[in-house]
Amino acid sequence: MYMSRSVAFHTLGCKLNYSETSTLSRSLEADGFVKKDFNDQADVYVINTCSVTDNADKECRYIVRGIQRRAPEAFVVITGCYAQLKPKEIAQIEGVDLVLGAAEKFNLVHHLSELTKSTANSGAQIRSCDIEDVEGFHSSYSQSDRTRAFLKVQDGCDYNCSFCTIPLARGHSRSDSIEGVLANMTELAAGGTKEIVLTGINLGDFGKGYDGGKKKETNFYDLIQEMDAHDGIDRIRISSIEPNLLTNEVIEFVAQSKKFMPHFHVPLQSGSDTILAAMRRRYRRDLYADRVATIKKLMPHCCIGADVIVGFPGETDEHFKETFDFLHDIDVSYLHVFTYSERDNTLAADMKPVVPVHIRNERNKALRNLSYQKMSYFTEQQRGAKRNVLFEIAPKNGIMEGYTDNYVKVQTPYRPEWVNSIIEWEL
């Protein structure tokens, strides 16, 4: 039996993927593997993939080709969403030895112990199952130089947005227990982490799932109350939460909390009710505007981010103008803009009329420019205010960076005594 002793990881996609990669890395290190930088030579390379856009698929292929040039004798393992959605397609990529679907991702140590040169030379091995058979929740967290940790508390999604493959790649909604989350908080605090970012596929859906056959009866509001009362972690952020699940009681709780940061990321996707309906989103623009107004009423200094998709099938110039004007007028602080790309096995893939790619790109650029303007305006509004900044560990060219509680980036000449410390700062 062949057991490699060094491993390198590469992550594509979301914060949830990063938390899972970090957990996989710790499990292999506990089994005796030596972790190496992905650009170094290693015995095993693990790529944790995303499949939200076509670019993620193409990037996976590009990365495998690079490994082949750098370390042709190494084992290459592909896992993550792309691996669950298209395992046979990945197995055809030259240089791939093992494909692990959603149910087998956290059995990586076991599968590597069985991977030999003879099995690898006979073609890529696929270890996967139907996504409907994926059960259970695997707790994960990632740490960035001990300053900040991405803590996975929920996985999967029961929504069926017409453009999205995530339910096909991640399965049904399920979550950790509150006790499990608090135990992870204790571990992170013991390691020196000052800030936790809560992550999940549909974070506001926390509480769904079963323990020992019994349905859980907790929700996201219960979770944040318990986390707020936990000692050891100074700051907690909510990474992304659907507007229909961002309740007034959650907003009000964050407004009075000393641990939960005044920062929300609330996906919008479109400012046109017609397009929202075609996307099968569970809200309309009025509800979104109401959530933003409530946040700003209680926390005028709060930073609010939004996800937007441009070029969805049927999006006319007038629909896009609705989105642009809506985002221009409401008090959000920045945008994450995505260009729509067709995904197999989604309802939107067959919708007409298709928006030409060059128009999709033009709309993306227009919203990215708007995002720059809105973030500049939000930052200028904070000028002269005193906010708490958590400074990060790794300096860049003698400059250290940190973020205020309301997500304004601060830079200053490196001071070692400020590393992983929260400092009051006048903006």
Image (cartoon, rainbow, N blue to C red):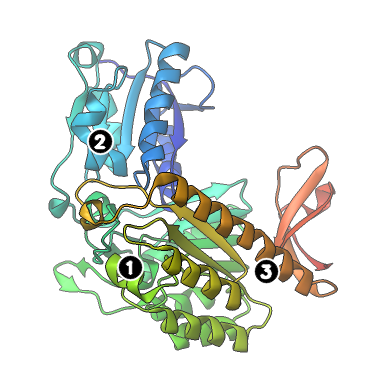
Residue shown at 38% from the left, 48% from the top: 356
Q: Which residue is mark 2?
A: 100
Residue where numbered disc 3 is placed: 405
Amino acid type, label 1: Ser
Q: Is the residue 185 above or below the residue 322 in the image?
A: above
Query: Disc 1 designates what residue?
Result: 177
Q: CA distance from mark 3 to mark 2?
A: 38 Å
Mark 3: amino acid: Asp
**From the viewer's perspective, is 154 left or right of 110?**
right
Q: CA distance from mark 1 to mark 3?
A: 27 Å
Where residue 380 appears, as percent x and y from the top left, is 78, 69
Q: Is residue 342 visible?
A: yes
Q: Are marks 1 and 2 in contact (CB under 8 Å)?
A: no
| Left-right relation of 335 to 164 | right
Q: Which kind of residue does numbered mark 2 sit on?
A: Leu
Q: Secondary structure at mark 1?
A: loop
Disc 1 crowd, CA 10 A, few/some/many (<14, 14-19, 20+): many
Earlier residue among tags 3 and 2? 2
